[in-house]
Image (cartoon, rainbow, N blue to C red):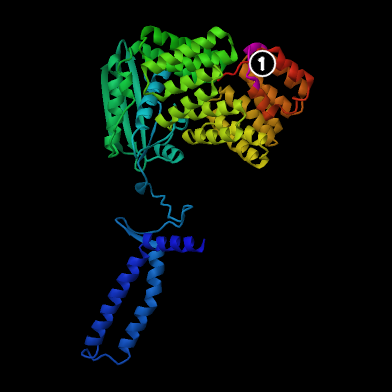
Amino acid sequence: MAGKSKKSLLGQFYQRKVMRVALAYIVVGWIMMQVGEVTFEALGLPPWALPFLITIILLGFPIALVLAWAYEVTPEGIVKDPAGKTESGQVMRNDKSRRSPSVAVLPFDDMSELGDQGYFCEGIAEEILNALCQVNGLRVASRAASFRFRGKQSDIREMAKQLDVQAILEGSVRQFDDHLRITAQLINAEDGFHLWTRQYDRHREDLFAVQEDIAAQITDALSLTMTHSHLAERHQANPLAYDYFLRGRHYFAKCNGRDAQYARKMFSRAVEIDPGYGLAWAWLAYAQGFEYLFFDASEENRQEVLQTSEKALSLAPERAESQIALGIARSMQQDYTGAGEAFETAIEMNPKMFEAWYFFARLKIRQGHLNQALNLLQKAAETQPQDYQSVLLQAQLFVSVGNDEQAIEASRKGVEKARAALEFAPDDNRALNLGAPALLRLGESQEARRWMQVSLTNDREDPLVLYNAACFYALSGEPEEALDCLEKCFLKAGTINSDWVKNDSDLDNIKPDPRFDAILLSSENQPVS
């Protein structure tokens, strides 16, 4: 341990250029003493002048070392050297000019006459964001983080500070007939000046080329190289099919029953128009899996999900989304080994994809592998730092594994993220009903009850809301209300995975009740994703 500390300290001496300064000081000091010895007597200086010079040089040596440690010479002048260290002992530099380039993509503004193209503007921005995520050396703020600023007239510097990026991409879209006018501008967050700006007047079928060109121009402006873009696969998509695909993804992101069913219709329409659209098939499998879990647990629907995922894989084998769809389908077939392999492949293909980590974690929860699920949820949270679902699920799992301290910390972080989501989207019912049980753990019972009541008022028929209400009432010591909600959830959903329910620590207070077992036995439970 001591050896490691010495090595670390020596490394900092080299990194802060202390050794270089010491050697330079010794050389210069020795030259000064030689010059003094030759010239002082000729200049008629008193005998004590040379010893005085030597004393000054010796006294200045430690001062020079201290200054070398604390300050650094840069092109901008002499600056204080940051004192923060990483766990390995290396100096942490917070100067943005020394970090890898970073950018946030804001949702484009809808400039259409009716103002009804918000989903389309979001889709354009998200495609550019996804393409930029593939650029080596570029940090890209997550969709959840940057889309919080949709429609807000915030200062660019303040947005960049909150997102921790150096540049902001913003733009607007105006549609008229089959034409598009897209304006995009990349802004330097430090001074507010434009790094790049351009306006495109194109037909709708040229949209993919525009998206890819914007991504390429951004990487060029940031002095990076764009080696690959997933937009290439979309060049073959029919523009109208792509429009339906964007509508579906917009609604599916809302995480509630009615919108998920509407999303399925949009994805179905996309593949009807363009049967070769692999990505739309993958997202259709997502929506079908959701419907199987909460609305239609028929064998016909389960087989349909498997066929849809196989179609996605055959059309877009290079996409991580196809592997995720396959993992979901295999989970529903009780092929947990095959499902895990599919999720692992998706992660290898795209480690930044939130859905791969998240659905893999949910699979591990159903299997009862809670510690593995915790690790996967942590990875999911890292890919989307603003996501509250992955953090709040961690809180529940920490309780299950007996780590109450971590459960409280995860609840606190999850509630903070849920509050931020509600500030951005007050109608986010998922944040309310998933956050309410976490608030109870934190002792904030009054706010917790308000969140749950608002959630139930918004949609008392949604099985997701009912299930989380059951968790809430079980935690609050109201077993009859909890069991009522759980029973209604089963009736509305048609099925809830029994393994998930048995591993859910939020329901521990009602599990000894005979009615709990009766509810489980009364439903035809099938493992689902």
Height in image: 326 above or below 404? above
- Splitting the image into 4 quarters, where does residue 182 fall? top left
Picture quarter with the C terminus: top right
Magenta span contains residue 516: no
Find out whether residue 497 is within the magenta segment: yes
Determine which quarter of the picture holds residue 10.
bottom left
Counting every numbered tag in the picture gives: 1
Residue 247 in the figure: left or right of residue 437: left
Residue 454 can be seen in this image: no
Secondary structure found at label 1 = helix
Out of 516 and 261, give the one closest to the viewer.
516
Q: Tell me the kind of residue under disc 1.
A: Cys
Q: Is residue 119 visible?
A: yes
Q: From the viewer's perspective, is 367 left or right of 183?
A: right
- Percent across and percent down for residue 444 are 69, 34
User: Where 320 falls versus 378 (above or below)?
Assistant: above
Magenta residues, start to end: 491-498
Q: Residue at x 28, y 74 (%)?
A: 27
Q: Is residue 270 left or right of residue 209?
A: right
Q: Position of residue 259 (x, y in %)?
A: 52, 15
Q: Position of residue 331 (x, y in %)?
A: 54, 20
How packed mark 1 is, by other alpha carbons closer than 10 Å (few <14, some 14-19, many 20 or more), is: many
Q: Disc 1 marks which residue?
A: 489
Viewer-closest of 102 and 269 = 269
| Quarter of the rendering containing residue 39 | bottom left
